[in-house]
Amino acid sequence: MARAPWRRPIVLSSVSSPFSNGAVAVTDNARFLANIIAWCCGPGATVVFDDAHQGATAYYDGRAFFADPRLHHTIAWIVFLWFALVLGALPLRAAQRSWQPLDEGAYVEASARYFAHVVPPHEVAQRLIESFLRRLGAGTHPDREPALWELFDEDSRVSDRQRRALHVLYEHACAGKRVDLVRLQNLLAQLRENFE
């Protein structure tokens, strides 16, 4: 019974060294190759060798590969796009300084907290009222500083309620009694608005 023409045996070799140009003539490699071809192929058959992955091809030339201008253009474009990404799309990180300046608001708040813990409240109240009175009489009567209360009491822009409240707070401050600094500050702010 004749075999079907498409049923051909397959011989698979994991290496190509026995049939390379340098080794095919060594020992019986040529005979072994001829026997394989005679056993597998009939008249008019075709033999295909896939040895490109072994690097045994004649058309591979390393010098030609690295001299190809397409390789140089590809590398140049990769470098250009990398620079464009780094310099354009990605934000540059600023160099961190070891010395960090203190915020002005934090400095003022820290100073205020220090004085609030050190200076007694009645002394603070007394200085606030005296400073307000000096600003009120600044430039009017330089030789009459002790009479600043008279200028304040005679001013028509001050209501009776505000006048009495400021007198009471000042008396408490001079006597060393407890003074509500928030109330005093609000009262002085209202009086400053009246004089503006």
Image (spheres, grey):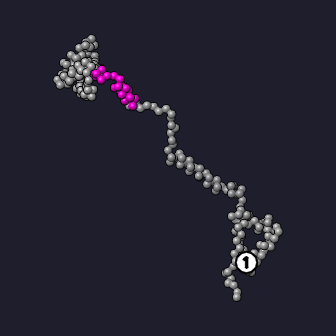
Choose between 152 and 110: the one closer to the eye.
110
Residue 108 appears in the picture as rendered: no
The residue singled out by tag 1 in the image is 40
Q: Which residue in the rendered view is the most extreme toward the top?
A: 143
Q: Residue at x 24, y 16 (%)?
A: 148
Say left or right for 181 vs 16.
left
> Is 111 a magenta residue?
yes
Q: Quadrant of residue 13?
A: bottom right
Residue 143 at x, y percent in the picture: 27, 11
Q: Residue at x 53, y 49 (%)?
A: 85
- Classify 88 as above or below 22: above
SS for dot 1:
helix
Choose between 64 and 52: the one closer to the eye.
52
State which quarter of the image contains the C terminus. top left
Residue 108 at x, y percent in the picture: 37, 28
Residue 171 at x, y percent in the picture: 23, 19
Residue 67 appears in the picture as rendered: yes
Choose between 2 and 95: the one closer to the eye.
2
Q: Residue at x 21, y 20 (%)?
A: 167
Question: Magenta segment range?
Answer: 106-125
- Classify 167 as above or below 66: above
Give the dominant element type of the magenta stretch: helix, strand or loop.
helix
Residue 132 at x, y percent in the picture: 27, 21
Choose between 195 and 174: the one closer to the eye.
174
> Is 147 a magenta residue?
no
Q: Which residue in the rendered view is the most extreme toward the front?
A: 177
Say left or right for 186 vs 160.
right
Q: Within 10 Å of the Cα at label 1, are there few (<14), some (14-19), or many (20+) other Cα atoms?
A: some
Q: Quadrant of residue 180?
A: top left
Q: Quadrant of residue 1?
A: bottom right
Kind of residue at badge 1: Cys
